[in-house]
Structures are given as structure tokens and as C-alpha cells.
């Protein structure tokens, strides 16, 4: 018999997915809520930038003179340079968005088409970087704690 984790977790079984440690997870959320919106925004922006940095390292770089899906010439490094992190605070909420492609409209094709072979980088560069940073809520709470202690 497997032991039940003490911290918040999702445990897979034959019958589905079970959430364990709801009290622990709720405690983390309450601790996060006690922090000011400004602290949460700073921590979320920092976490967004960590995802952006990891994603940029994985982003494919076109060869000089490559042609994009719409027939335009691609500039090497344009897709990497199109990464953005934006944090907004509407009302009591904090929303951080990590995006790619505003200045490189072909980003979706490069990100999603798995059969493309890249000499530099890989498909799913943003998604893999996000998944690598999980669990996000705990990382944001830890950043708030570090920032409060003056070590962030």
C-alpha cells in the first residue's frame, strides 16, 4: 500500500485522480493571499520571466534566408526575441502572461508542428518550459517569502 503524501498532491489510481492534502494546499493559498497584491505581482512576474528564459533557450532559430509559412523571409533569432512577459492587476486579481509570437506570427506553427526537425531548439518550447516550472503556486509563494526576506 502506498503512503499518502502529506503535502498537496494529485494521486493517480485505476479509478481516476484523487486530490490529497487539500488543507495543505489551501494553507498555501491563504498564505499567498495574505501577501499584498504588489508582492504577488512581483513574484508572478519573476516566475513568468523564469519561464520566458527557459523557453528562449529551447526556441528554434531559423537559418538565414529561411522562408516562413506566409512566404516572408525569417530573420534568425526573431522568434526568440518575440517572447514577452506581462503582469496586470485588474481589481484584486494578478494576471501574468508569458507569450511568444506577437512579432513573429509563425510562432504557432514552429511551436506546434512536432514533425519539424530543428537544428537549434525544439517544438513545444514554451509548453515544456511551463511544465518544467511546476508546481507554479508553490514557486510563487516561495518567491514571495524570499522577496519579503530581502533575498529575492
Image (cartoon, grey):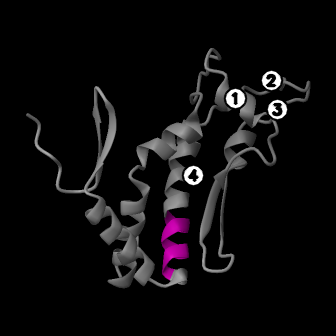
- Chain-order first, disc 2 or disc 4: 4
Mark pair 3, 2: CA separation: 5 Å
Q: Disc 2 vs disc 4: which is toward the camera?
A: 4
Q: Which residue is mark 2?
A: 66
Magenta stretch encompasses residue 45: yes
Q: Which residue is mark 4?
A: 52
| Residue 152 visible | no
Q: Position of residue 125 (x, y in %)?
A: 57, 36
Q: Which residue is mark 1?
A: 110
Q: Which mark, residue 74?
A: 3
Q: Nearer the viewer, residue 90 or 55?
A: 90
Q: Residues within 10 Å of mark 4 (few under 14, many from 20)?
A: many
Mark pair 2, 4: CA separation: 24 Å
Q: Which image quarter: residue 12?
A: top left
Q: Is residue 139 left or right of residue 89?
A: left
Q: Residues within 10 Å of mark 3 (few under 14, many from 20)?
A: some
- Chain-order first, disc 3 or disc 1: 3
Q: Is residue 115 left or right of residue 15?
A: right
Amino acid at each position: 500500500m502506498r503512503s499518502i503524501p502529506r503535502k498537496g498532491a494529485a494521486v493517480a489510481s485505476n479509478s481516476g485522480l484523487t486530490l490529497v492534502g487539500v488543507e495543505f494546499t489551501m494553507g498555501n493559498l491563504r498564505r499567498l493571499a495574505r501577501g499584498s497584491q504588489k508582492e504577488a505581482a512581483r513574484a508572478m512576474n519573476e516566475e513568468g520571466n523564469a519561464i520566458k528564459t527557459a523557453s528562449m533557450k529551447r526556441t528554434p532559430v531559423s537559418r538565414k534566408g529561411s522562408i516562413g509559412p506566409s512566404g516572408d523571409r525569417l530573420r534568425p533569432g526573431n522568434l526568440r526575441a518575440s517572447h514577452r512577459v506581462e503582469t496586470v492587476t485588474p481589481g484584486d486579481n494578478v494576471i501574468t502572461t508569458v507569450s511568444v509570437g506577437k512579432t513573429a506570427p509563425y510562432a504557432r506553427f514552429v511551436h506546434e508542428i512536432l514533425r519539424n526537425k530543428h537544428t537549434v531548439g525544439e517544438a513545444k518550447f514554451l509548453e515544456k518550459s511551463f511544465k518544467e516550472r511546476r508546481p507554479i503556486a508553490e514557486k510563487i509563494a516561495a518567491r514571495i517569502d524570499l522577496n519579503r526576506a530581502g533575498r529575492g
